[in-house]
Image (spheres, grey):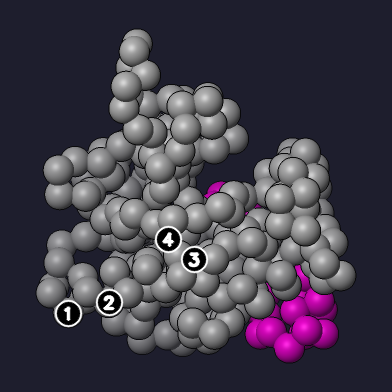
Amino acid sequence: MIIIPARVASSRFPNKVLADIGGVPMVIATARRVERIDRVAIATDSEAVAESAAAHGFEAVMTSPDHRSGTDRTREAAAKLGLDADEIVVNVQADEPFIEPEVVQRVFSRVGEAVRASEDLMMVSCYKRIEPAFADDPNHVKVIMDHAGYAIYFSRSKIPYDREEHHDYYGHLGIYGFTRESLERFCALGSSPLEDIEKLEQLRALYFGEKIAMVEVESRSFGIDTPEDLEKALEIFG
């Protein structure tokens, strides 16, 4: 199951999920990118988004307007959809209208591997190698991993600090894979100080000692956080 949380109350770019991408709203463009992987539902607190989803043939689930994160919204939608405890749930952000389907499939497959191996982890996400100059942008989240490929920390700052800039930086893509059961566990943790400081929901899992498995992907896509991001993306992707 792929669930796309979509709210309209974005402080940096209000109503961005309804911004036009090739003649359709951004959230619909995102849904179309991933619809061949698995069943897709759009989780929203907006009647306008729900109506747009229905008009373009996508399932919509109305959720509370009070969620602190997209993953909390995804959890409510998964519960309303009645998904089984071991069903794979991938949260794809609505502001990724150019995400490559292969990237989402890698996360989906890695969750499946963890289930079959009874691996002790809470969630799966992904990253790509980025240039040092790109790592300076706080709108693009960075991640560092341990030797086994589990996340150590995520930050809007450039991490790790390197005075000589001799190493690669890893940019995090905001795609999260769970089972329905691990999604429930994640949301039951509540918020954490690190999450509140960085405004990064995945830090909740690390703060409480849970594991996040990371998979490396190749991707030109990036999340649309500002009107400037949208302009840049349209220049790149057309």
Q: Is residue 151 above or below residue 166?
A: below
**Circle 3 residues within 10 Å: few <14, some 14–19, many ≥20:** many
Question: Residue 139 versus residue 54: which sits nearer the camera?
Answer: 139
Residue that appears at 67% across and 62% down: 97
Numbered disc in front, either 3 or 2: 2
Residue farthest top in this picture? 163
The residue at which mark 1 appears reads as 116
Q: Secondary structure at mark 3?
A: strand
Residue that appears at 21% across and 50% down: 149
Residue 218 in the image, given as x and y percentages of width and height? 44, 56
Residue 48 in the image, given as x and y percentages of width and height? 83, 70
The residue at which mark 4 appears reads as 176
Residue 236 in the image, given as x and y percentages of width and height? 71, 50
Q: Is residue 224 visible?
A: yes
The residue at which mark 2 appears reads as 112
State the CA–CA distance, disc 2 to disc 4: 13 Å
How many discs appear?
4
The residue at which mark 3 appears reads as 91
Q: Earlier in the sequence, mark 3 or mark 1?
A: 3
Q: Is residue 9 magenta?
A: no
Residue that appears at 66% across and 56% down: 95
**Circle 2 residues within 10 Å: few <14, some 14–19, many ≥20:** some
**Residue contact between numbered discs 2 and 1, judged by CB atoms under 8 Å:** yes
Q: Earlier in the sequence, mark 2 or mark 4?
A: 2
Q: Is residue 59 magenta?
A: yes
Q: Earlier in the sequence, mark 3 or mark 2?
A: 3
Residue that appears at 42% across and 85% down: 83
